[in-house]
Image (cartoon, rainbow, N blue to C red):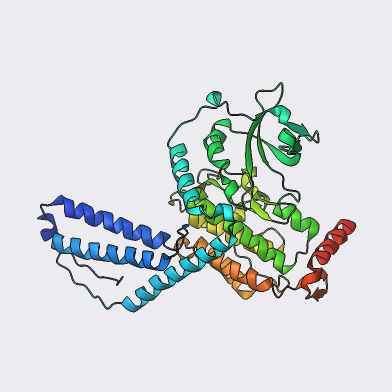
Amino acid sequence: MANETIIINNNNFNKIKTEIPYEKFSQIIKEIEKLYEEIIEIYKKAEHNRRICEKIVKNLKDDFDSTIQILNFPLKVNYNLNSDDDDKRIKADINDLNEYLQYIEGDLTDSDKNVSDIVIHLNALNNTINSKLYDHDEFDEFLSYNDFEILDNDLSSTRKCKRIKNGDNDFVALKLVNNKNDIIKQVKILSKLEKCHNIIKFYGLIIEDNNVDKWYLVNEWAEYGNLRNYYLEYGPLDVNLKLKFAVDIVRGLNFLKSIGMINHISIYAENILITDRETAKIGGNFNSIDYSNMNLERNSKLENLTQYIAPELLNSNSQRYETKSIIYSFGKLLWEIAEEKYPQKRYETFSTNSFLPKEYKEISQKATNDDPYLRPTLAKIFITLNRLYKYDDKNTYVLKNENYFEKDEDKIEDNRRFNRRYNRREG
């Protein structure tokens, strides 16, 4: 759509008697803004995405032009101003959308081909849950405590246990619930997130025997713990695994974005969990932190998250950007994955030892731009990282020790085992 310079005569505008066209005009403007913000983040599988998007854009433009004529605005329009650039941007966005959907479709199992229906259902469910108030005293949908065998007596907030119901005999994690009312609002939708393979599975809630005040979330067990512990114990990690982790995480973020839950999470290394298959999954911390009214110097919960907080959230007078703020945090996480250490400064540079591709470093830097509107979309980040991972998977360099890189796909797993044994011995 061409950029249009509109000059409105206020006197004529005030004389307009009909309110209906103006209301329609306002609605169209809102739809245009929404379209341009979301166009490449639409999470819907369709065979004719290009034609659908172009038709939407054309219809909006036609509606815009017709309502302008009805309102009889005195206009001065330069239809040639950057029109070529606008057309190129729209086509580029549509191309990105098509490429993104192709990648997503290729990653789905046959049982997940109805992903668009799943997304629509979860989005509606999330909106319903957010509109209701819940009292934990009224909640009674608990799993049976006797269906689980506690494997340790660790008093920490997360405990490992075995699920023995119906012969499942698999491992799960019990995570102590701190705020019962908050978690009840999310329980119904958390149980549906199993359709995304990059979010830790949630099975339900249990109450500890003889202690009705202790509630536990029952989550999928992550054998290797969180991402930071993983690279500290098993690093240095090879480039291919770093790219895989990055793609795993951004795929989970795109799913949460599509169902309207992106603003419920906080992204940092301790909330990324690594399973026994070396899959990175967004953890069970689905309560985003309200930074606006917190003193970072005094709040221990935020002490280790300072560099992950988007600058706009540090300004109490700033509006909340939600997705853009999460993108900033993910950009910081990309740096930590590359460097295998916690970012100490707001502006960190990549070392020559990270060996990540140039495009990886660029997308991390763009994601951490101080201006939220200049950060790339999650779909764009996914496309970039997935391309790098698909290419690197064919040309993998693996760190076998501190000074030696070996290119041999057949030896990747052996080298990873070497790294783990080496780090355990050195530790």
- From the viewer's perspective, tell me whether residue 225 is left or right of residue 186: right
Q: Is residue 394 above or below residue 249?
A: below
Q: Residue furthest top?
A: 210
* Residue 55 rendering spot, x and y as whole percentages: 33, 65
Residue 413 visible in image: yes
* Residue 12 rendering spot, x and y as whole percentages: 11, 60
Could you tell me which residue is drawn at 82 percent across and 66 percent down? 415
Q: Residue furthest right?
A: 425
* Residue 58 rendering spot, x and y as whole percentages: 29, 67
Quadrant where the C terminus lies? bottom right
Image quarter of residue 28 = bottom left
Could you tell me which residue is drawn at 62 percent across and 29 percent down? 142
- From the viewer's perspective, tell me whether residue 367 is left or right of residue 171: left
Quadrant where the N terminus lies? bottom left
Could you tell me which residue is drawn at 46 percent across and 66 percent down? 97
* Residue 251 rendering spot, x and y as whole percentages: 58, 58
Q: Is residue 211 above or below residue 328?
A: above
Near-viewer residue (101 or 285): 101
Near-viewer residue (269 or 311): 269
Could you tell me which residue is drawn at 34 percent across and 78 percent down? 84
